[in-house]
Amino acid sequence: MKTEPWRLNEHQIKVLKAFCGTLLAELNDVEIESLLNTKTKIPIDPEKIREFGKFDLSKHDEFIELLINNLNRDLPEESLSKLSKVLTLLTVRPSSFLLTGHFSPFYEISRKDREIIMQKWSKSFSIFRNLYKTFSDIILIPFWSSENASIFNSTIGYPGPDPRINSRLYTDNLKNFPVYEFIQVPPEGLELQFDVVVIGSGAGGGVVAARLAKAGYKVLVIEKGKYYHQSELTLTQEDSTTKLYERGGTLTNEDNSIGILAGSTFGGGTTVNFLASFKLPNFIREEWASEGLDHFTTKEFDNSMDAVSERMGVSTKAIVHDEKTKVLIEGCKRLNYHIADVPQNAAGAEHQDGWCLYGCRYGAKQGSLITWLKDAGDSGAKFVQDCYVKKVLIKNKKAIGVEAIVGSDERKLIVYSKKVIVSCGSIHSPALLKRSGLHNKNVGKNLFLHPGMCISGTFPDREIKSYYGTIISSYSGIDTDVYERTKEHYGAKLEFVPLHPSYEVASFPWRSGLDHKKRMLQLIHHSPLLIIGRDKSSGSIDFDDNDVPKIHYTINDYDSRNITEGVIAGVKVLVAAGAKSIYVGISELDEFVPAENDPLQDPKLKSFIEDIKKFGTKNCYFGSAHQMGTCRMGINPSTSVVNPRGKTWEIDDLYVADASVFPSAPGVNPMITICSVAYSIANFIIEDDQKTGNI
């Protein structure tokens, strides 16, 4: 908890405003003429374009106030302190000179010179890249998420929330969304007794709770986020990310090079994910079994995956390929690349909902909230929301319950139980184990992220509208090329993803005030291609004095090369599909314009590919929606945190059941694997208790 609100002085606010006026700048007359010539199928209203061109974010005090409030809400004290210091350095002439090359405070430097400074930072050493990324993200993402930006929705062709938000698609499916009741903790606190406490309600916790409750255990599920009924899902960018994502969607690694999205709501990541529902590949099962985890190649694990897939309605039926996915299919077919449909947990129903990353208002996504938690409740499980578990209670090397606080007023909750299942996810599960006094050196190590980066093709004659349609319906597994070369199952996959305005600005580096506004005018024509890697190297998580996670992760040369090869393959796909320009997110490279005739044989393309190889992707900005491995499963406490049945080596009756137990990155969307592992661990608990007569 913050001891006091974060405040800025007058000069620091001037610096912050100067960054706002650089990133979303008032363009001059020549730039506005260029803006008016932007190729787009949106009906051009010259007055609206001029209004957009003249817009200067630094002149909008209400946004500055919103920005400061958001930073106060989402960033930990340490990050805010660092930001304050940087703002101060840019108010003082000597330190401003060291950072900018100008003896003036940042707010006294001309807009054009500030633009040049930002451009230089983006291509410089890591400390300057970090400054560039920090200010780009903390200003552009909140702006394009906020109501302030809605005045330009019609200008850029963005509808805002899903236009179908109150249609029959919503009203006819209200019955699909379960209603939950939650235990109310009074001001004086509460003590409870259960057989099992499950901490976390996502892909791991939901499954364990359902299985154990059905087997007759008295189960309590604790969730630190909140439950939102579908009627409460606004599908707006700012409100949704604030309510449904960890730290309001602002979580990053320590050097700010990787943005990390993690669900923080009832149902966890299954409430906000993209429906991709892959079973664990056979070669990964064999890899994990080769480390002594024999269960992963057994018929029993097959049964777990089948049961999970059936309950979650996993299927490729009724998939509709939208315009962005057609680009991937067209490009891959012309290049003879692999292309396949992505299984989805939509119960075989057509699910064209590009807003589903903000929660499924239509109740079609069969996440934990719709399936496992409902099953748990139907079998008698109870629930507590908005509840932070401070520690697992341990006595004589056995877990005997948890100590927690509920709500912003921190009402005390003590729950005594025979078993504790930690399913907080790969960021918070290791934190809880450490807070509870576990000393295993592997806790927090072995972090995998499936790092991904976006490239984008512009199709001025096609309305892509990537935020409409199915979120992900096809993928290309180009990682087979890496296997042929290295005999290792690493490399990258290609997927098209939806880019709402805030995701657009988060995914592609800002180049200039004019370039930014031109790109936003072409939003409906952008086809965003995600290159997502199976990482071989790993990072770690530790925690500051306030238990705030600190994520240490740097992409190594091996993984960077594989992602670079993915970028090159993605460029070829976009060229083959007819993109008129391509943006690769490498700061040193300008937008590439393919030749009109025979573009795949164009010498300029070959030169561009050589430049991609030259600069590589190691210094690019990445994203991660999959965090795994920080409480590793294994056969020896010297190399793992839990044993092959999910129980911690140090403490009896304490289990971990989520993505943190993965021995390595699976290379596919992990939801079905998390659920299947949790299903297996629940079965192990039931089997062991039956043998000892504890059930």
Image (tube, rainbow, N blue to C red):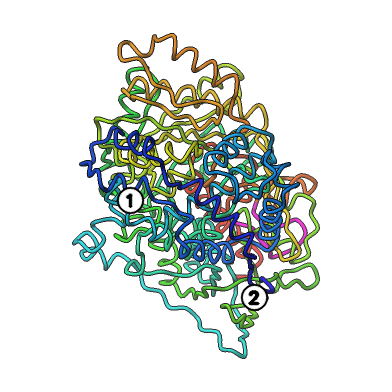
Q: Secondary structure at mark 2?
A: strand
Q: Is residue 73 left or right of residue 499?
A: right
Quadrant of residue 311 in the image?
bottom left
Q: Amino acid at mark 2?
A: Ala
Mark with earlier residue (2, 1): 1
Residue 50 image offset from top left, x and y in percent:
31, 45
Which residues, given as a range, are shown in magenta?
Answer: 645-657
Image position of 422 with respect to 22: above or below: below
Image position of 529 with respect to 233: above or below: above
Mark 2 = which residue? 404
The 10 Å Cα crowd at callout 1, few under 14, some 14 to 19, many 20 or more, is many
446 falls in the magenta region: no
Q: Is residue 369 left or right of residue 135?
A: left
Q: Report the front residue among 437 and 397.
A: 437
Instruction: Give the label, 2 or 1, closer to the camera.
Output: 2
Mark 1 = which residue? 346
Q: Report the front residue among 106 and 265.
A: 106
Residue 547 appears in view: yes
653 falls in the magenta region: yes
At horizontal 70% and vertical 41% (from top left) the residue drawn is 127
Q: Report the front residue among 171 and 163.
A: 163
Cβ–Cβ under 8 Å for marks 2 and 1: no
Q: Amino acid at mark 1?
A: Ala
Residue 70 image offset from top left, x and y in percent:
53, 63
Q: Residue furthest bottom?
A: 188
At horizontal 31% and vertical 15% (from top left) the residue drawn is 596
Residue 464 image offset from top left, x and y in percent:
29, 37
